[in-house]
Image (cartoon, rainbow, N blue to C red):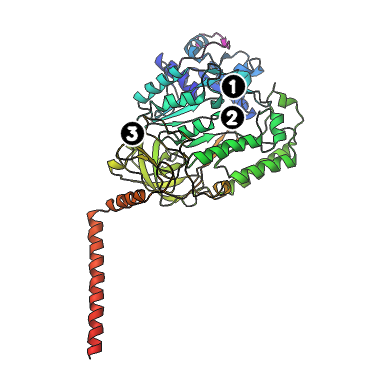
Amino acid sequence: MSDSEYMAGQLSAYGYAINDNPEEADLWLINTCTVKSPSQSAMETLILKSKSARKPLVVAGCVPQGSKDLKELEGVSIIGVQQIDRVVEVVEETLKGHEVRLLKRSTLPALDLPKVRKNRFVEILPINVGCLGACTYCKTKHARGHLGSYTVESLVNRVRQVISGGVKEIWLSSEDTGAYGRDIGVNLPILLNAIVAELPPDRSTILRIGMTNPPFILEHLNEIAKVLCHPCVYSFLHVPVQSGSDFVLKAMNREYTVGEFKVVVDTLNQLVPGMQIATDIICGFPGETDEDFAETIKLIQEYRFPHVHISQFYPRPGTPAARMKKVPSRTVKNRSRELTSVFESFTPYHGMEGRIEKIWITETATDGIYLVGHTKGYIQVLVVAPKSMLGTSTYVKITSVGRWSVFGDVIEIPDDNICGGGDVLMGDSAIFGLSKDGSCSIEETECYACDCEERCNDMDTHKVSTNITNQEDRRINGGSSNYYSSMKHGVSLRWLISRKQKNWLGSKDGRTSGAGEKEEVSRELARFSYIDWALMGVMVLSFACAMISAILYFFIVNSS
């Protein structure tokens, strides 16, 4: 998506117009994905349509980069993943009737190229290309190659640029976020802390961290948890497990065990309040037995992940897995259906009604009626509100829940309750804020969220007790969730968010203090309006009159 936005931006800057009607276009440009066979099949269909329509064609992305000798690409201009900064040149030559093939890997494309965003409020920021893995089923490595990271300075400069341009969400994008910087002598926590320091203290812009594989995040779990606690960062992370069987993971060459994956999940769930973790499962990998698949089912049931992307195995040409003995197609489909059934049996949003949540609104729903926002835990919230609220953050009260999203009403919150000048708001989930002296305040957490201009306190120094009695309660007694479904190339992408915890009030060292309780009571009483006090006075007066009448009646009866 980011590559497409960059190519569209350069073409627009050169004078070309992006046309939604293929028949009216002078040239077709197809950006491709090679992860699964259906996406490549979609590309092949579009190529045939373009040839039938006699349209000049440029094919970009991972398919031509990883499979340049495909028969379907004969006579077609192609451009590689690291040549997108030359897209204007390729289009110009193709329109002249020339066939261009630019696939040589070069330096990373500049981050400040012109860009036409699909959503003007969302910046998709690639932090690196390629990865350090060698998964036996992965075709993307053939296209994206070895790890190549952008410098911290260049990424921070881009963040400053897009924030000044009105962006409200920044999505860090990567084949493996956790591997960032290992080729240039830095690491992911260094980058995240540098980016967070640039985010506006009014929480108007929020950061979403991209997908990370378990091996490279294990050594940075505490640092990553501190960043995820930050009020300007979504408490959400995509960590693919792919299988619940160590045997299958070894055949995939995933370079971690199920136990190591559990360490990642358990640690983040323990240290980050309201943490939501997405994961991926591949059903029917070559050699997967019924026992192996049962281990996968067990893992999903144990953790009840709020987001699960379930996919059938697709052999990609040129990968080691394509040469392995396949599981029968019927078995693969049955396993996919069974896992989907287990996943869809969860009740992700139960108990969210009545909660007050801060959301960031960045898009309009497909029905054109609702605006779409997300809570800090990345729960999708649909609200009826004017489109002028796009690109803003606000507080909502959850009024009802559906299977895949929740509905809320926008509520007015006094200015002194917003981060930077007020108290923590009510809600069953963790709500972040600043006290009036500028210090950080947070409910039901095991780390301390800080103002966007500060760092979180040291995770090892500030541990607090939790009302959740054990990790099993965390996994099973879930509350709110988000499910995002995107049917693309026949594959259902499902993301859910869950977990509801008990509220408690703690001091910075984790001990509940009497003074803190009194302050909380005072704040709650201070929220009463004059009308509330008047009504309460009337009630007290009525009660007093009733008592006096009862006493008088008692004396009159006795005297008679």
> Residue at the location (69% across, 37% down)?
245
Of the two numbered discs 2 and 1 on the same chain, state the one appearing first in sequence.
1
- SS under mark 2: loop
Q: Quadrant of residue 217?
A: top right
Q: Residue 241, position in %: x, y?
A: 62, 35
Q: Residue 486, position in %: x, y?
A: 53, 36
Whether tag 2 and tag 1 are in contact, CB under 8 A, the answer is yes
Tell me the CA gap for discs 3 and 2. Answer: 32 Å
Q: Which residue is mark 1?
A: 131
Q: Is residue 135 above or below residue 354?
A: above
Q: Is residue 322 magenta?
A: no
Q: Is residue 358 visible?
A: yes
- SS under mark 1: loop
Front one among 46 and 195: 195
Q: Which residue is mark 2?
A: 213
Q: Residue 297, position in %: x, y?
A: 66, 43
The crowding category of the residue bearing disc 3, from other C-alpha atoms within 10 Å (few below 14, some 14 to 19, many at least 20), is some
Q: Quadrant of residue 168?
A: top left
Which mark, residue 202? 3
Tell me the CA gap for discs 3 and 1. Answer: 35 Å
Front one among 327 and 477: 477
Instruction: Please state the extent of the stretch shown in magenta in the rendering.
Output: 95-110
Disc 1 marks a residue whose amino acid type is Cys
